[in-house]
Structure formats: C-alpha cells, structure tokens
Image: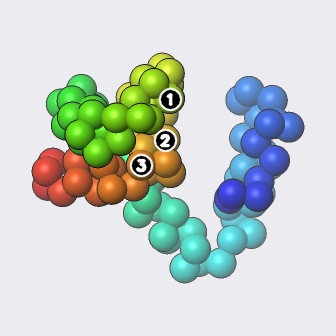
Amino acid sequence: MLDFPWDSIKPHDVGPIVERWEAMPETTRRQLQVILQDVNELGDERSHKVLTEEMEWRFHDKLEAFGAWKSLLDKALWAYLEARTAFAEAWEAEQ
C-alpha cells in the first residue's frame, strides 16, 4: 500500500482502499492484517506510554514528528513505519 495515492482520496472515501485491499494477494493481505493488529495493540493509553518511552530512548531525534500525530493509533502506525525498533520493543513489552 506504499504506492497507494493516499493524498488523492477524500475523507471517508474508503472505496478505493477496499478495492486495493481486495485486489491484493491473500498472503500480502494477511501480512498487513498482522501489522494492523500489532498497531492496534499499541494504540491504547498504557501501550502509548511504553511506546513513548522507547521513542525517547531510541529515537529522541524523531520525538517531535511522533508527537505531532493526534491519535494514539496514528502514533503507533507512524512508529511502525518510521521507528521500527521502538515499535518492536514496545510491542514485546506489552506481550
């Protein structure tokens, strides 16, 4: 989904996303489901604190960008994409 034109879709217009999702090979879809489940697990208050601590320790230079995201889920997804080590350590700590 990295090549998906995210900037060109309107809010709440999920049709193009659903179309892309359904066109994906099953293995790719399952991999993305696991990633999204992991992101969801780090999207609550307690997990956010752990993720923030990992960001402070491992990616201090990215804290401003991390903090700019409003929702906890957005922050968790951003960490997965931009600070994978912090994300992985926080996920492990929450298991």
Question: Is disc 1 surrounded by few (<14), some (14 to 19) or many (20+) residues within 10 Å?
Answer: few
Distance from Cα at disc 3 to Cα at disc 1? 11 Å
On the question of residue 27 being in view, the answer is yes
- Residue 87 vs residue 42, the one in the foreground: 87
Q: Amino acid at mark 1?
A: Ala
Residue depicted at x 50% and y 51%: 81
Q: Amino acid at mark 2?
A: Trp
Residue depicted at x 15% and y 48%: 94
Q: Position of residue 63 (x, y in %)?
A: 40, 29
- Residue 45 vs residue 62, the one in the foreground: 62
Residue 66 sits in which quadrant?
Answer: top left
Question: Is disc 2 surrounded by few (<14), some (14 to 19) or many (20+) residues within 10 Å?
Answer: some
Q: Secondary structure at mark 2?
A: helix
**Left-right relation of 1 to 76:** right
Residue depicted at x 72% and y 50%: 17
**Left-right relation of 55 to 10:** left
Distance from Cα at disc 2 to Cα at disc 3? 8 Å
Residue 44 sits in which quadrant?
Answer: top left
Q: Is residue 61 above or below residue 21?
A: above
Distance from Cα at disc 2 to Cα at disc 1? 9 Å
The residue identified by callout 2 is 78
CB contact under 8 Å: marks 2 and 3: yes
The residue identified by callout 1 is 65
Q: Is residue 93 above or below residue 11?
A: below
Q: Position of residue 58 (x, y in %)?
A: 29, 45
Residue depicted at x 39% and y 55%: 84
